[in-house]
Image: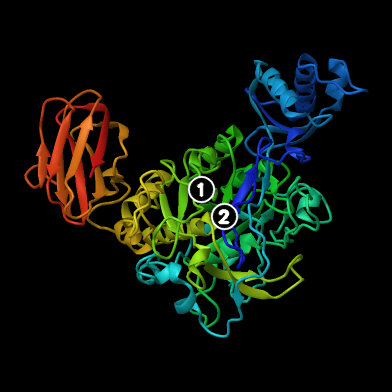
């Protein structure tokens, strides 16, 4: 994936990190993704036999695919050239092939391995690259006082912000652990509270990428810098770049010290941060990220001590290309099963997010980006897979409102090459930690109120149901979810004593105009939704398809009841139409009440 060149260059622009797949690396690049494979067998392979079975399986597949080297030709010889690297936390095996393969050879080999009945799946281990613009001059300032009011519109602005001031009266995130999987942390920044920082872990196995003295994972998550010294160092067409300190900026949006008379504020300043380093020089491997997800959420990774502080929230400001790799999905599903909420950047290529993992994986919250005006940014990915939006900044809006400002560093290379600073960045990478921090506020507030924390699916429903409408609606062809994150509204809903949001009817799905939602099932209690209407433009709510019977109710402001509604449709079956000729600019509640069990129904709002 090539860097996004559509943004101006005046300030430091840090977009969400991109996965460079084999097909998207510029022509002529030496792509390391074509020599590493992830193989998951159906049955657990005993450690003593694992290396032998891997070599035999892959060596035989290489022979069948007609792939050989001058010294390795037979199946037995090819097997000896296969190098098992390690077992991932998901149970899959990571290995290195005897030689790099071209795309045609790789596809033949993948097909042959997948045909083996012992193999559950096989896929290449992909490299991760940062999709960042050139950085001729960081947009920064030297703080000598509290800069929250002037610079952090994303927290307090009534149009483009997330309503942090009201949220802080209800929660500041105490007791919740948030993991940031990124380039690492700068724990010595004076605007970070050491008491809120855990040691974390570095999962970058390649010493050339980690810039540590030895290969393999290691305790701690210090950002050693991801600078490059020459054009073409990462792939053909890559450019020299200074260290991004991307992870430090993302983490500061969540954890930066608040009300300490210096610098800026974090959205969940009393939460605890778990830094997990998975990206370094020229990016990082998916296999490293998968182990980071597993370990951060409380799973076991071979050769690494178990995490004594499993994270409640995982922030992945990471972007890729293509379908969701199965190894990603396995790690995500396992993390969610442990109770972790995963929040992911939608990506910055202004394309449909369905082509950008891990945001197109299941069981995550996918976040798009808005500007200070509340409009979709020029770079944000979009589509039905984006769940909601949060402030990401738009550089063309100028300083300070063009950027998300947080604690970072101005050094060009190592963490000893400059000074601690405050820097403005833009991207869905910057939008994502706003959502992670809000999830931390919600879980903390519920526990403090004697209630259970929300399961991952209910957290997603809550954040969507409490989002406020876009002040500048995105184009119909570029949806970025149900609205803009509202931290205070999420907390009010989470703490509502009249209705526990752990139940579906308290966090109804937000409907988008002209966007059908299919596969809706219900009984007598039915299904509930909300919709923001434009003033004066006729509003039609339709249901169709499926089986069974239902009655459709619509009401402004509050949920409808059988005797309280603004519009109702009670035909036989599931085909209903409720019309409001002159709606107000307000939220409308939709209720599909089951006359009997209904299944497979589609609901859509047209205005």
Residue 398 is situated, as x and y percent measured from the top left of the image, at: 51, 70
- Report how far apart the C-alphas of labels 2 and 1 lie in the structure: 10 Å
Q: Nearer the viewer, residue 515 or 112?
A: 515
Q: Quadrant of the N terminus?
A: top right
Classify residue 134 by image quadrant.
bottom right
Task: Look at mark 2 in the image and give the residue it sits on.
Answer: 6
Task: Look at mark 1 in the image and give the residue it sits on.
Answer: 350
Residue 152 is situated, as x and y percent measured from the top left of the image, at: 47, 72
Q: Is residue 84 above or below residue 558?
A: above
The local crowd at label 2, few if under 14, some if 14 to 19, many if 20 or more residues have their Cα within 10 Å, is few
How many discs appear? 2
Q: Is residue 84 above or below residue 446?
A: above
Q: Which comes sooner in the sequence, label 2 or label 1?
A: 2
Q: Nearer the viewer, mark 2 or mark 1?
A: 2
Helix, strand or loop for disc 2: loop
Q: Are marks 2 and 1 in contact (CB under 8 Å)?
A: yes
Helix, strand or loop for disc 1: loop
For the point 52% across and 80% down, which residue is it? 260
Which residue appears farthest toward the bottom when viewing the image? 144
Residue 54 in sight: yes
Residue 551 in sight: no
Left or right: residue 354 compared with residue 53 = left
Left or right: residue 474 compared with residue 217 = left
For the point 50% across and 40% down, which residue is it? 360
Residue 287 is situated, as x and y percent measured from the top left of the image, at: 68, 40
The local crowd at label 1, few if under 14, some if 14 to 19, many if 20 or more residues have their Cα within 10 Å, is some
């Amino acid at each position: 994936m090539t860097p996004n060149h559509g943004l101006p260059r005046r300030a430091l622009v840090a977009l969400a990190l991109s996965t460079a797949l084999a097909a998207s690396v510029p022509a002529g690049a030496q792509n390391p993704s074509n020599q590493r494979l992830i193989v998951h067998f159906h049955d657990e392979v005993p450690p003593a036999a694992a290396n032998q079975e891997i070599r035999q399986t892959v060596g035989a597949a290489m022979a069948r695919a007609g792939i050989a080297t001058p010294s390795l030709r037979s199946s037995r010889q090819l097997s000896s050239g296969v190098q098992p690297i390690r077992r991932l936390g998901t149970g899959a095996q990571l290995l290195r092939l005897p030689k790099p393969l071209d795309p045609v050879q790789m596809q033949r080999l993948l097909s042959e391995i997948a045909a083996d009945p012992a193999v559950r799946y096989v896929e290449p281990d992909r490299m991760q690259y940062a999709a960042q613009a050139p950085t001729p001059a960081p947009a920064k300032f030297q703080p000598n006082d509290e800069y929250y009011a002037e610079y952090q519109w994303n927290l307090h602005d009534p149009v483009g912000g997330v309503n942090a001031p009201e949220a802080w009266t209800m929660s500041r995130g105490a007791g919740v652990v948030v993991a940031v999987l990124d380039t690492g942390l700068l724990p010595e920044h004076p605007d970070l509270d050491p008491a809120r920082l855990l040691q974390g872990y570095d999962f970058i196995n390649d010493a050339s990428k980690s810039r540590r003295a030895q290969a393999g994972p290691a305790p701690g998550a210090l950002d050693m810098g991801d600078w490059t010294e020459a054009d073409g160092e990462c792939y053909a067409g890559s450019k020299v770049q200074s260290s991004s300190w991307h992870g430090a900026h993302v983490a500061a949006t969540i954890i930066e010290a608040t009300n300490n008379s210096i610098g800026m504020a974090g959205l969940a300043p009393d939460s605890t941060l778990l830094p997990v380093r998975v990206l370094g020089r020229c990016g990082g491997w998916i296999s490293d990220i998968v182990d980071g997800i597993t370990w951060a959420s409380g799973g076991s990774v071979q050769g690494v001590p178990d995490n004594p502080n499993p994270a409640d929230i995982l922030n992945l400001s990471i972007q890729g290309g293509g379908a969701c790799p199965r190894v990603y999905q396995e790690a995500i599903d396992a993390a969610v099963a442990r109770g972790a909420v995963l929040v992911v950047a939608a990506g910055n290529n202004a394309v449909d997010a369905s082509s950008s993992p891990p945001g197109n994986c299941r069981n995550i919250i996918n976040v798009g980006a808005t500007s200070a005006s509340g409009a979709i940014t020029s770079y944000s990915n979009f589509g039905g897979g984006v769940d909601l939006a949060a402030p990401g900044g738009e550089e063309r809006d100028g300083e300070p409102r063009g950027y998300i400002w947080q604690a970072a560093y101005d050094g060009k290379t190592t963490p000893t090459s400059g000074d601690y600073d405050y820097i403005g960045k833009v991207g869905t990478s910057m939008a994502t930690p706003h959502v992670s921090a809000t999830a931390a506020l919600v879980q903390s507030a519920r526990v403090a109120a004697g209630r259970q924390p929300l399961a991952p699916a209910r957290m997603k429903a809550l954040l969507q149901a409490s989002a406020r409408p876009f002040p500048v609606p995105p184009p119909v062809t570029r949806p970025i979810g149900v609205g803009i994150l509202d931290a205070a509204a999420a907390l009010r809903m989470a703490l509502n004593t009249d209705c526990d949001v752990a139940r579906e009817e308290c966090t109804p799905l937000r409907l988008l105009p002209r966007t059908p939602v299919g596969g809706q099932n219900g009984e007598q209690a039915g299904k509930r939704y909300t919709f923001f209407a434009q003033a004066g433009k006729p509003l039609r709510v339709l249901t169709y398809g499926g089986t069974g019977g239902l009655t459709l109710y619509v009401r402004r402001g509050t949920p409808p009841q059988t005797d309280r509604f603004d519009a109702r449709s009670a035909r036989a079956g599931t085909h209903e139409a409720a019309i409001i000729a002159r709606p107000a600019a307000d939220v409308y509640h939709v209720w599909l009440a089951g006359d009997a069990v209904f299944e497979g129904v589609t609901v859509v709002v047209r205005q």
